[in-house]
Image (cartoon, rainbow, N blue to C red):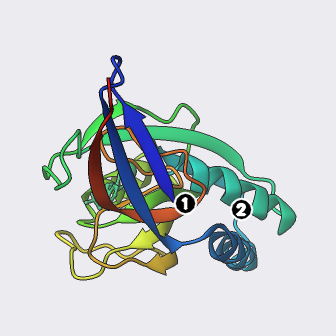
Amino acid sequence: MRSAAGNDKGQTMQTKTIRVLFDEKAIAARNEEIAKAVAASEPRDLLVVAVLKGSFMFAADLIRALHRAGLEPQVEFVHMSSYREATVSSGHVEILKDVESDVRGRDVLLVDDILESGRTLAFAKDLLMARGARTVKSAVLLEKPGKRAVRIDADYVGFECPDLFVVGYGMDVAHRYRQLPFVGVVEAEREDRKEQ
Ligand code: IMP
Ligand code: MG
């Protein structure tokens, strides 16, 4: 895929190539499998908590797959930030938007884009358990192995991700590429001078 962006005066055109790692079809098929596995665990009073922003597309597709699998989850959002504009984890988790529903006695499914250091997910899981959730499981679209800083495993993993910074399907680098319907790697950047 190629995407182009120029400045206001149109003097410079940047062309970036995104190499597709996981395409729409593969993601859709995996979402159905994960939803069936969640349904097979027979959750009680299921509350899906999507971790913003990166998981919004995965969560939207997974929630519809959960519906097809016969579940009636309620949906909430939490926004935590440990990344900011950097592409390496700062090791600090901050709550920017909290869950509004009462989680007491409920089976919670945390949905996130990538499990890397595990800090974000471990923090969210501890928080929801401390608030009285019956169980807190997690579904992540991607898992980067060998990167864990805290001991946590996701209960459902879409795909193992190579140790590359990925974008698309909700994930960004400096706020870009969330709209892509697939997961890919920003591979090349070319600057073409435009004739005046
Ligand atoms: P951690 O597991 O606490 O280190 O945080 C994982 C979070 O970092 C994910 O939810 C993403 O928001 C972000 N992240 C990690 N790796 C990538 C990547 O390759 N692309 C985009 N975001 C990433
Ligand atoms: Mg995230």
Residue 189: give its label.
none
Amino acid under disc 1: Arg
The answer to whether residue 105 is seen in the rendering is no
Horizontal relation, residue 149 to residue 26: left or right:
left
Q: Quadrant of residue 154?
A: bottom left
Which sits earlier in the primary sequence, circle 2 or circle 1? 2
Horizontal relation, residue 132 to residue 151: left or right:
right
The kind of secondary structure element at disc 1 is loop
How far across and how far down the image is residue 178, in percent?
A: 48, 46
Q: Quadrant of residue 13?
A: top left
How far across and how far down the image is residue 53, in percent?
A: 45, 41
User: What residue is rendered at 37% in x and 31% in y?
Assistant: 6
User: What residue is rendered at 37% in x and 37% in y?
Assistant: 175
How far across and how far down the image is residue 145, in percent?
A: 29, 81
Horizontal relation, residue 76 to residue 126: left or right:
right
Q: Which residue is mark 2?
A: 44
Q: Which residue is mark 1?
A: 134
Q: Is residue 174 above or below residue 6?
A: below
Question: How crowded is the residue under tag 2: few (<14 C-alpha within 10 Å), some, or many (20+)?
Answer: some
Q: Is residue 98 above or below residue 83?
A: above
Q: Is residue 101 above or below residue 58?
A: above
Q: Quadrant of residue 97?
A: top left
User: What residue is rendered at 16% in x and 69% in y?
Assistant: 149
User: What residue is rendered at 73% in x and 52% in y?
Assistant: 73
Horizontal relation, residue 87 to residue 96: left or right:
left
Question: How crowded is the residue under tag 1: few (<14 C-alpha within 10 Å), some, or many (20+)?
Answer: some
Position of the C terminus, as image quadrant, is: top left
Amino acid under disc 2: Arg
The Cα atoms of the two marked residues, 2 and 1, are separated by 9 Å
